[in-house]
Structure formats: structure tokens, C-alpha cells
Image: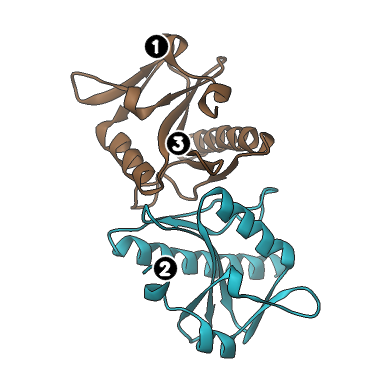
Chain colours: A cyan, B brown
Amino acid sequence: MAVRSFRRRKSVGTAAENELIHKFWETNSWVCVRVAGSGSTKYPSPDLLASRGDKKIVMEVKIISDVKKYFTRQEIRDLEYFAQKFSAESWVGVKFLENQWYFIPTSELELTKSENYVITLIEMKRKGFSFEEMIE
Amino acid sequence: MAVRSFRRRKSVGTAAENELIHKFWETNSWVCVRVAGSGSTKYPSPDLLASRGDKKIVMEVKIISDVKKYFTRQEIRDLEYFAQKFSAESWVGVKFLENQWYFIPTSELELTKSENYVITLIEMKRKGFSFEEMIE
């Protein structure tokens, strides 16, 4: 049952990533790939890498059934390290169930008292970017 | 049987890609990821993406039991399109069984009379690059 539930979460995550990959390719100016084994390899790696040539993005993607999502300081640091190596911007993309996608650069994430980062639905409605805004 | 043989080829390919990923990370200056679903998605995508910041590489990786490997013009074109989007160099990495890895930029591949590209073991011994030479 645990395995089944893990598989289901994984497939929901993959479907979400694929949805974003299509959005990038549909622009006809961006290319985008999904990283294999992200979250399971021993090396830090983002979920997605996208590029238009003059602008590159590395991204963590989350589907959230709650109204709040935490990221550890290490997760964000790894993403920013990777972005720096690829001359890319680092973004987090979140989809709260039954809401649209919201995107935010990691530089705008706020550190909590417990030294994690948090994204809430309320905050993302206020300061999150749409897909179109992100790729401008 | 066909499925089993396909799975085996696939796992040999993945092991080869993982070997190269380790080589990149071991340098402590390069980062590298394997692309998910490469070869099965409808979008052109390389097997590997690697970057050191000032130099980026997109790569097709092949393990070859023959002494010769063909690439279609479209495969190489797709790889070069992707490279151009990522401001990267496009390379092909081949490992002929019981031989070392050889690497070659796609710009140095030779077009055959039938409009494909071909890589032979003899040629790679003459003009292929080692991993260390490629990442210099």
C-alpha cells in the first residue's frame, strides 16, 4: 500500500512535469527536458531544465494537496548551485490542487524561523508569476 | 523475448550514461544530468546535459557492439538545435565494446553518401577525443 501510494504520487508528479514541458515547447522558442532520477540520484538535480537561448531556467516542480509547501534550505541551495553552473535562473513551480500553476524565483522565497523555505497559496496568489510571465 | 532484449539494451545504455555522469561530477567543476525519456518523447532531446558554467555540452551516448555506428541526419540536427538553444556544444560519446570511451563534436562527423553520419572505431581511434580532452 505504501509502495502503491508512492507510485501514485510519483506519477502525479511526472504528469505535472510533462504538462510544463508541453507548455515550453508550445512556445516554439523554448526547449525543455525532464531530468531522469531527480530526487533519487546522489547528485543535486532539478526537475526541469528549459532554455530559450538568452534565458535559461532550472526548476523544481511540486503538486500540492495542502495550502502550504516547505522546502529545506539544502534543496534550494542545490537548485541555485545547479542554476549557477548552467547560467540559469532558479525557479520553483507549484500547483495547489484545483488552482493554476504559480511560479516564483528562489531568490524571492522567504526563510522561516526554522530555516526552511515556505510557499503558501495565499502568498503565491499575491506574488507568484504565471507561466507566461516567467518565460517573458 | 524481444521486450527482454530491449530492456537489456536500455539498461546497458543507462549504465553507460550513469558512468559518464559520475565522470562529470568527479571533476568537482562540472554538473551533469541524464534526460528522462530521451528517445521516447516526441520532442528532440539529448541523453545528457552537462555544464561547467563557461562551457556546456549536450550529448548523445552510444554503446556499440559493432565497429561502426550510424546516426541519421535528423538525430544530429535535433542535437545541434538543442545545443544552440542551450548555448552548448553538441557531442557524441561512443563506447565500442572492450574499448575506451571516445568523444567527437557533431561538427566533425562525416556525412555518408546515403546522407547519414557514421562513426567507426578506426576513425575514432584517430580523431576521437578522450573525456579529459573534451572537458578541457
Q: Hey, what amino acid is under mark 3?
A: Met
How far across and down, in percent of the image, does residue A82 sit?
A: 59, 53
The structure residue drawn at horizontal position 36% and vertical position 56%, both measured from the top left corner, is A52
The quadrant holding residue A77 is bottom right
The quadrant holding residue B83 is top left
How far across and down, in percent of the image, does residue B128 sit?
A: 45, 17
The structure residue drawn at horizontal position 66% and vertical position 64%, both measured from the top left corner, is A76
Q: Would you say A5 lies left or right of A18 here?
A: right
**Circle 2 sits on which residue?**
A19
Tag 2: Cα neighbours inside 10 Å, few (<14), some, or many (≥20)?
few
Distance, label 2 to label 1, CA atoms, is 42 Å
Judge whether A117 appears above or below B88 on screen.
Answer: below
Judge whether A58 appears above or below B103 on screen.
Answer: below
List the single residue furthest toward the front: B54
Q: Would you say A112 lies left or right of A62 here?
A: right
Judge whether B122 appears above or below A50 on screen.
Answer: above
The structure residue drawn at horizontal position 56% and vertical position 55%, both measured from the top left corner, is A83
Q: Nearer the viewer, residue B81 or B65?
A: B81
Q: Hey, what amino acid is under mark 1?
A: Glu
Q: Which mark is residue B59?
A: 3
